[in-house]
Image (cartoon, rainbow, N blue to C red):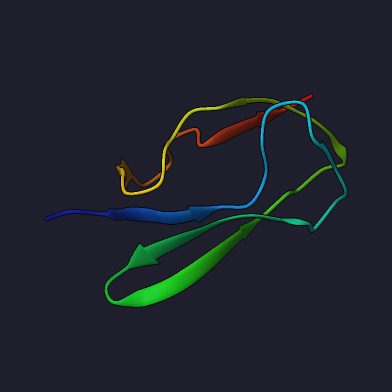
Amino acid sequence: NFEGGIISNIRVKEGDTVEKDQLLLVMEAMKMENTINSSVAGTVKSIKVAAGESVLQDAVLIEIE
């Protein structure tokens, strides 16, 4: 029972300044595209995933400080 998805597109890079609610990445799960938006404004510290990678639910995908 896989609960997660596959990263299809990353829209930011490390060092980018992002606004609250800005699109960070797109993930496919159960044949649906889900957009992941920033919950805070800040700077992208690190990206923990790559396009095409499978991720589990609750995994850290992007760190923003």
State whether residue 45 is above or below residue 17: above
Going 82% across and 43% down the picture, which residue do you hit? 40
Residue 22 in which image quadrant: bottom right
Q: How many marks?
A: 0
Residue 18 in which image quadrant: top right
Going 41% across and 38% down the picture, which residue do you hit? 50
Q: Is residue 31 left or right of residue 14?
A: left
Q: Is residue 42 left or right of residue 50?
A: right
State the image coordinates of residue 62 (x, y, percent, origin top left): 59, 34
State the image coordinates of residue 63 (x, y, percent, origin top left): 64, 28
Going 63% across and 52% down the picture, which residue do you hit? 11
State whether residue 19 is above or below residue 17: below
State the image coordinates of residue 35 (x, y, percent, origin top left): 57, 65
Quadrant in which the N terminus appears: bottom left
Q: Is residue 48 left or right of residue 44?
A: left
State the image coordinates of residue 55 (x, y, percent, origin top left): 33, 43
Q: Residue furthest bottom?
A: 32
Q: Nearer the viewer, residue 43 or 21?
A: 43
